[in-house]
Image (tube, rainbow, N blue to C red):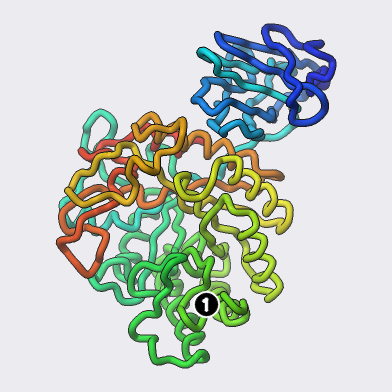
Amino acid sequence: MTIINPGFEAGLSGWSGAGVLEAAAHTGSWALRHGAGRRETTQTVTGLANGWHTLTVWVRAGRGPVKAWIALVVEGAEARAAVPVAGDAWLRIVVSAEVTQQRCTICLCSEADGDEWVCFDDVALVPGRAALPIRGADISSLKKSEDKGGRYRDADGAPAPALVILRDHGLNYARLRVWVDSPDGYHGRAQLLEMAQRLKAAGLELLVDFHYADSWADPGKQPKPKAWEDLDFAGLRSAVYAHTAEICNSLAAQGTPPAMVQIGNEITNGMLWPDGKNDRSFEPLAALLEAGIRAVRETVPEARVMLHVDNGGNNALYRWWFDNILAQQVPFDLIGVSYYPYWHGTLADLQNNLDDIARRYGKDILVVETAYAFTPADADDYENIVGMSLVCPGYPFTPEGQARILADLLTIVRAVPNGRGLGVMWWDATWIAVPGNGWDPAEPAAGNNWENQALFDFEGRTLPALRLLGRL
């Protein structure tokens, strides 16, 4: 049996419960609108094949933090997905449940106050499960944190190794950055090999993030390693190949090959400046990427290769960048996205971009960097990079606000067409404020400007968002 009146074009025919019609529909002439109070609109669908089914609903809410959700109820058990705070924009959200008696009930629910409201439209139920096979975190700071005295605890305050906590919360991937010759000796080959062994023992897969720099590389800076500064372009390509091959070979030799490899970090504006800057042409960047990718294919052929760009809500940027890189016939497997809600647009912007690039390029997508603050305070008298001026409407800088925005982000990634949304990784989830483990690797006394965005609080205890991150 199919859903009756999925777009509410026939009013509430086929549906039970409260609700009125709204003319500002997603498609067609009408949508369902819930206003103040508790509202529930339901429909039971029968004649289904047993197995996993996914409910898809387009939703739109006012600018306030409306409590609303969609759900599938099977034999009294409910699976739900919350309606994100989207600023009066339509979003497509999904939730999956396993049908066991050839029937389930679709629920469209809300609990709104005052003039809050939410709309639902274009309801669909299809076979299959929307799940995220990758639930991970960048933990590049962890080794140094531990060496400098950092300690981690579960939500009850019981001490435990950070990797054990992450694994027990359902995470299955960890990302580690690699610098060529770090000023403080961390983030290099030796630490990567040690951490890879620990990840394997904990049952976590490894994503290697090559920066091709001695320190931070991002859209605003892509400096060459000091040892490579005097190389001509041919020498630079050879250095990229040799460095990548050495790291990957070393990992494979000790029985810990990476599952994924990132060639460059947030290379929106190219890498290894000025040679690999892509402001005039993508050809030099493509040649450097090809050298790194060739090294991966020849040393760890099972690893999937990612290219990583920032500003995940900017679809024009992604079309420009990937159209150009594919025109150069660069062979890669995955699209890596950075999405920081306070910098990179709304969740509606993100969904528009992810949907478009999933269809346009036919490649799997991983939100490989995201974060949000659980407090505006700082723990080490070193100003944080994110303060109250960057708080997003509907998502306060509280443990609950951090968890809410992550839950909504996970919902968006689950909804990427054709299952192309692989998952989400939280950036430097274990970077708590520990003296000596600051932002500047060349200055031991520098503080940490990220600790209010970790997934552990200032006492090293897990935060609610960590429990969400590990869920399928």
Q: What residue do we see at 26% from left, 57% from top?
A: 143
Mark 1 nearby-residue class (10 Å; few <14, some 14–19, many ≥20)? some
Kindly indicate the quadrant of the structure image that contains residue 396.
Answer: top left
Q: Residue furthest top?
A: 17
Q: List x then y, in percent, for residue 323.
A: 69, 66
Q: Nearer the viewer, residue 53 or 82?
A: 82
* Residue 447 visible to an observer of this rendering: yes
Q: Amino acid at mark 1?
A: Lys
Query: Which residue is under mark 1?
Result: 277
For the N terminus, give its image quadrant.
top right
Q: What residue do we see at 61% from left, 10% from top?
A: 39
Q: List x then y, in percent, for residue 138.
A: 40, 53
Say if 390 sits above or below 25 in the image: below
Q: What residue do we see at 23% from left, 58% from top?
A: 438
Q: Is residue 459 left or right of residue 272?
A: left
Question: What kind of element bears circle 1?
Answer: strand
Say if 358 sits above or below 413 in the image: below
Q: List x then y, in percent, for residue 194.
A: 31, 63
Q: Nearer the viewer, residue 285 or 303?
A: 285
